[in-house]
Amino acid sequence: MSSTPTERRDAVLQASGLVRRYGAGGAAVTAVAGVDVSFREAEFTAIMGPSGSGKSTLMNLLAGLDTPTSGRVLVEGRDLTRLDDRGLTRLRRERIGFVFQSFNLVPTLTAEQNVLLPLRLAGRRPDRAHLEEVVRTLRIGDRLRHRPAELSGGQQQRVAIARALLTRPAVLFADEPTGALDVTTGRELLEHLRAASTELGRTIVMVTHDPIAATYADRVLTMSDGVLRDALERPTTQEVLAAMTRTERPC
């Protein structure tokens, strides 16, 4: 895939020359091998690839959860590789949201308390209008007083998404968000992620192995051997499957 110019002014998130290598000498393994990529505001991108392709490592680097061996990651123009631990922690807390397979909800708190938790930990007051907008978009208004045990898996995941969105992150990362859900609930969740992008203007980067899930995105990037291979715009399931087949062939 052709590289994306670095420091694009319309990019919320971008990486240039990104490399992540584990080990040294003959035992070294390169998980990400010189990736250049950018993500625009309100763009929903899915990253796909076979096991061991480097897609999860790439997401961790983009989210500031891992440190690159070389290269840069910029969030709203701020270079993550130049931040100290305190600055990186603050940026992740304020400008990056996370949604994972495990919902990570506090069982003793209500749904609303779980949604508000990151703001309360940061000593910030919630914007009630924005809270109402997020709650409406994710359709959890009638579940705010319920505790996680009283919610379905899909409802718990929506609460987790609301929690991630409430801080108005520059980027929301979703790691296999439908992996623990049944097909119907998973599709509903993807519709909510789609709405978070189109209605709330959030930039979303989702790692998934599901070609149907990928079709909810504006753009699908396929990856193998630590390198981005294809970029597909609003592809069909068949186009995603064909691209995935190409990543599995010897390069």
Image (cartoon, grey):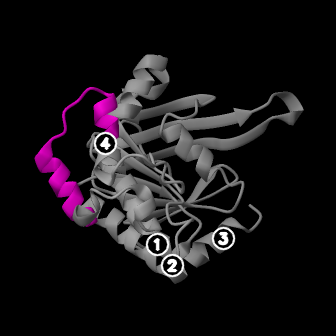
Q: Work out how far the residue at label 1 is from the one at label 2, CA to CA, in angstroms.
A: 5 Å
Q: Residue at x 49, y 31 (%)?
A: 72
Please indicate whether residue 69 sits to the left or right of residue 122 in the image: right
**Nearer to me, 186 or 20:** 186
Quarter residue 158 falls in: bottom left
Q: Which residue is mark 2?
A: 183
Q: Is 125 part of what is drawn in magenta?
A: yes
Q: Residue at x 53, y 83 (%)?
A: 238
Q: Which residue is mark 1?
A: 186
Q: Are marks 1 and 2 in contact (CB under 8 Å)?
A: yes
Relative to 246, say whether 176 is above or below.
above
Would you say residue 200 is visible in this rendering? no
Q: Are marks 2 and 3 in contact (CB under 8 Å)?
A: no
Secondary structure mostly seen in magenta is: helix
Relative to 41, say whether 233 is above or below.
below
Q: Which residues are magenta?
A: 117-139
Q: Earlier in the sequence, mark 2 or mark 3?
A: 2
Q: Work out how far the residue at label 1 is from the one at label 3, CA to CA, in angstroms.
A: 26 Å
Q: Earlier in the sequence, mark 2 or mark 4?
A: 4
Q: Which residue is mark 3?
A: 246
**Nearer to me, 172 or 4:** 172
**Please, which residue is most extreme toward the bottom here?**
238
Q: Quadrant of the C terminus?
A: bottom right
